[in-house]
Image: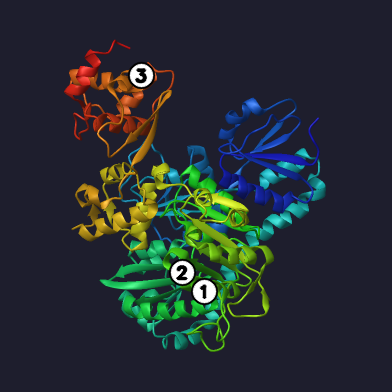
Amino acid sequence: MMKQNKIVLVAGSIETKEALSEQLHELIGDFIQVESYAVDDDFLPLFTDQLILLSSNQIKREINEHLGENCSIIIAKRIINFSSIETLFLIPEGENVLYVNDFPETVEEALASVDKFGVQHLNFIPYDPSKLLDLKIKIAVTPGELDLVPDTIETVINLGPRLIDMSTMITILTRFSILEAKLEAVSDRYLQTITRLSQKLRLATSEANRSTDHLKTVVDGVDGGILAIKQGNVTVINEVAEKILGLRRGQALNRRVGQFIKDHELLYFISNADRADDLINIRDQEILVHKFLIEPDQTIVLTLKNVSEERKVEQSIRRDLKKKGHLAKYTFKQIVGEHQELKATKVTASKLAKTDLTVLIEGESGTGKELFASSIHMASNRSKGPFLAINFSALPEDLVESELFGYEEGAFTGAKKGGKKGLFEQANGGTIFLDEIGDISLKVQARLLRVLQERELLRIGGEHIIPIDVRVVAATNKNLLNLIDAGEFREDLYHRLKVLYLHLPELRNRYSDISLLVRHFLHEQGLGHVKVEKEVIDILKEYPWYGNVRELKNTIDYMLAVSEDSCLTVDDIPEERFFQRKPVIVKERLGNQEIERNTQSEKSFTKEELQANPELLFILRTLQGLQQKGEGASRKKVADLSKLHFQYELTEQQVRHRLELLEEEGYIKKRRGRFGTRIMPKGEAVLRSTPSL
């Protein structure tokens, strides 16, 4: 017997699960219980007596083994996510747009729903990985399948997961025998969602028409370019913007933005909802473009300033923000990367953000600790409050206490008249970020501990207790437990800080994100048009990146500085001394052995240790065999051959580490080109004295 008033949603990814679960809760959640799972990340139990809603037909074969007795299945019919559809109206009319999804049938369904929503000014091309892609296509649209978008695409618009259509909702109500009782309520809610979008677009046009004459008078007097866009059409443009863009008002007003703006970088910026500022080269001018959205008519407004002028304005704004404490600049959407470990960290961090508890973030330098701290603040219920950051490693010891806790007038020589509020007071109602917490003295640690325990402070030289309401996010790149053992960090403070915990993944553990980060850095600098050779990305994935994302960004900045054209090549990569050195001790697990090697010593392991290790011997014999056949020996080829030799497979990363070990001892020589890595006489000698495997 199927369980009453409960439906189980099974989707492919977490993103799809969350989007569809939210929709189901909104439409039917008050009378049907919704339970959700993602095949990619969740543990699937054995389902019995359940009505199961699958996000697509392809999910069915993946959950067959989890289907018990009396389970009934509904395959969801889905439509484009209409909450993001307005971005499609910003694409120039007649543009070829690649639509990318995981399966051909889902592409067809999605394009049918796009047409129903009136997006008919674009030439959509279904993505087929088996066919050669037209290199003239520069824009791609996808419902969350970013990893499937070809590298040649310059602009990618993510609409988010497709939503469940009304016919599927009717099917669900029918299965629970409540169609007649609940259809009207569900239909009203569904239509209200679509109506809200339609009303926003209609109201935007009406409001623009009423205010155009008045706006023209106002905006022409503004010292800066202004461009307003509604539903993809330009409704306001002032004289400064005309000059910057090199056109007349009549060429732009009431026309689609893509018809007169041909700069792909600027069009990408306009259509990308996640970006609010960018530096773009327009007609050989460096223009700082700022974008914001006017509610409730959904008007996109661009302001355009020459860099030198905008820097003066920005400095003034930053000074004002610093006085107010509103310095949070990043959200989780701005954290670049699709690697599973990073995505899981972001999911965890977003959950931690919902509480008011103290968070300790640990991670190597350059992993983005302040980025995550800012994002946690912006995702918390304190996002409207101030966000203040202090880096203890950059602040002199004698200033730390006064900066954190403030002081009263006359507290010490040089104290300001009237005293001064400390950062904790200024952050009241918001978040304070304590970066490099491992660098503070024991004296400051004692005072900080009291603040965390009592939620109150005493200014230096003060007599009155000041209550505070501040959330603390601390970060360190040091091992605080080692500092505790050394007597340099208080154990009680450690436990006060580590109420919640977050470890940020190192870049060397998410090499797949390097290409995304490189492209992000280029767009950040308004250089999205710059190409990057595939071999450059391959080589960058070889580095250990002990400076993490910051070191990678520095590398790209260097390459852009030395590059002589609009393409980054292997010749632009800095020499080896540019990169941070490897640690002295590196541990490698080889089969059942663990070899500890010192990169600054003469020997990492003995000949006997080598002969006793089957993986190293296998690699040597494989290189020997390929060399005798005149074939190249790539890491991929060695990894593939390991499947036939062992009961397990060596990854390309494991092969790379083992080749490094062998090369350091002179057994092999790594080379580029068609011959690849070669075995050396020392390696041949080891094989001659070792029995065949």
Mark 2 or 1: the one toward you:
2
Find residue 479 and report its horizontal and vertical position in percent.
Answer: 49, 50
Residue 397: image tag? 2
Instruction: Identify the residue at image location x=21%, y=57%.
Output: 563
Instruction: Identify the residue at image location x=32%, y=78%.
Output: 308
Quick check: 129 above or below 236? above
Residue 517 in view in this figure: yes
Mark 3 or 1: the one toward you:
1
Instruction: Identify the residue at image location x=82%, y=48%.
Output: 181
Q: Which residue is mark 1?
A: 403
Mark 3 or 2: the one toward you:
2
Say which label, 2 or 1, has the lower sequence index. Answer: 2
Task: Give the number of callouts.
Answer: 3
Quick check: 54 above or below 267? above
Q: Residue flagged by tag 2: what amino acid is it?
A: Glu
| Residues at marks 2 and 1 touching, judged by CB atoms closer than 8 Å | no
Instruction: Identify the residue at image location x=30%, y=47%.
Output: 581
Give the distance between the C-alpha atoms of the residues marked 3 and 2, in whole angstroms. Answer: 54 Å
Q: Label 2: state its secondary structure.
A: helix
In this rendered view, identify the residue nearer to me: 462 or 177.
462
In which quadrant is the C terminus drawn?
A: top left
Q: Among all residues in the image, which is located at the extreme front? A: 487
